Amino acid sequence: MGKIMENEHYWLWLNNIKGIGQKKTKYLLDYFGHPKEIWYSSNDDLTDVRGITKKDIISIRQSRDSDKIISYYEKLHKNNIDFYSIEHKNYPQNLKNIYDYPYGIYVKGQLNMEAPIIAIVGARKCTEYGKEVAKYFARELAKMGVVIISGMARGIDTAAHKGALEGEGKTYAVLGCGVNICYPKENYNLMNDINENGALISEFGVNLAPKAGHFPLRNRIISGISDGVLVVEAAKKSGSLITADQALEQGKDVYSIPGRIKDKYSEGTNELIKMGAKMVTKVDDILEEIFHNYCNEKHKDSENTTLGLAEIEKIVYSCLSLEPLFIDDIHIKANIPINELQLVLTKLEFKDVIKQLPNKYYIKKL
């Protein structure tokens, strides 16, 4: 008698049936409602499912090996890889809101969906300027507790991950292969650092090699998990623009770095700005929007390793810039009681990260 299957085992099984991809999985779930029902379905039942062939039915039937599925699930855990189905509590809530969400994801590392997440994407063949800009924005956002998500590709993606790590923050890489496969190979050390300071994410099973068709698919996950997408450099037709388009369809904010009009790697970013993306020239352009969405959340008293700021201090700090801001305006922006705000401002002054001007105006210190 086989081992007893649990909920996640059924989802893992469905995610690994040979020849059954995202589209056929949807057909099966639309018909049966749950992987467990598919597991116990008869051949006659399966014959009635749209898009399912005789070959698929044989594949489904032959894959029903509970010992093998449970053993595979346990092996994943031994290798520090988690599988989260759409029903699992750790499955990213943001991802559930996109049209064609994956029914399961593999995660190596730790996800923290409580913090704001910004995707930074751009050209693989980018300029040195583009790399520095991506690294700078990622580093400064990470210092403020923002998680940076990208695709670990060459160029802008790699620079973004490195910047987040330099800022001693968290970063997630969404891969077009299994989470145990490094692509490109030169990012081996970076991949290990991301695993230690964030997470590697993929909808593709372990040991699955990267394929050209996988990368457009993973782009929807990058935009889906994020709260907004920053495009640093992009040609007029590029995967980064696909990610931006998907973000817009998902109702996410899209930010774009402007560039020279004759530069081919600025054609895409300039076009995005013309289409309504927010032009970004400084980190505060992003912080002032994303932290506004998090002002009403319950914040933990964790410390920021770079600035030494507690969560509530980060919120107040993010409301300030080099332009003086009156205390009442900070109160409205941060949505924090005035008495508590005064205490936080005093702490920030003591930490020498902000400065009080006459008449209760405040600015950031460089």
Image: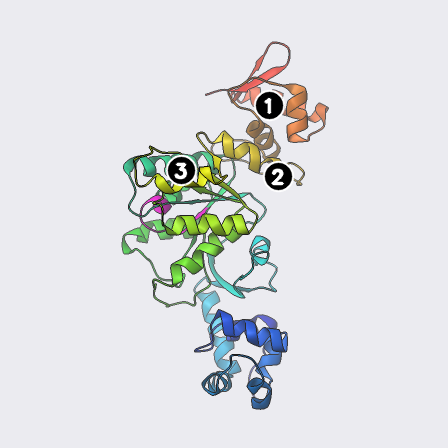
Whole-percent x, y for residue 326 in the image: 63, 18
Q: What element carries label 3?
A: helix
For the magenta stretch, what is the residue range?
A: 149-158
Indicate the amino acid at tag 3.
Asn
The residue that disc 1 covers is: 347
Please indicate whether residue 160 sits to the left or right of residue 320 in the image: left
Whole-percent x, y for residue 211 in the image: 34, 64
- Which of the image's four quarters has the C terminus? top left
- Sequence-first disc among 1 and 3: 3
Please indicate whether residue 45 sits to the left or right of residue 256 in the image: right
From the viewer's perspective, is the residue at label 1 or at label 2 nearer? 2
Q: Determine the residue positioned at 56% across, 20% down.
A: 350
Q: Determine the residue positioned at 54% across, 66% down.
A: 103
- Looking at the rendering, which quadrant does residue 167 occupy? top left
Q: Nearer the viewer, residue 314 or 57?
A: 57
Whole-percent x, y for residue 117 in the image: 52, 45
- Sequence-first disc among 1 and 2: 2
Q: Which of 24 and 94 is in front in this view?
A: 24
Q: Is mark 1 on a helix, strand or loop?
A: helix
Crowding near the residue tagged with mark 3, few <14, some 14–19, many ≥20 C-alpha atoms within 10 Å:
many
The residue that disc 2 covers is: 293
The residue that disc 3 covers is: 270
Q: Is residue 111 visible?
A: no
Q: What element carries label 2?
A: helix
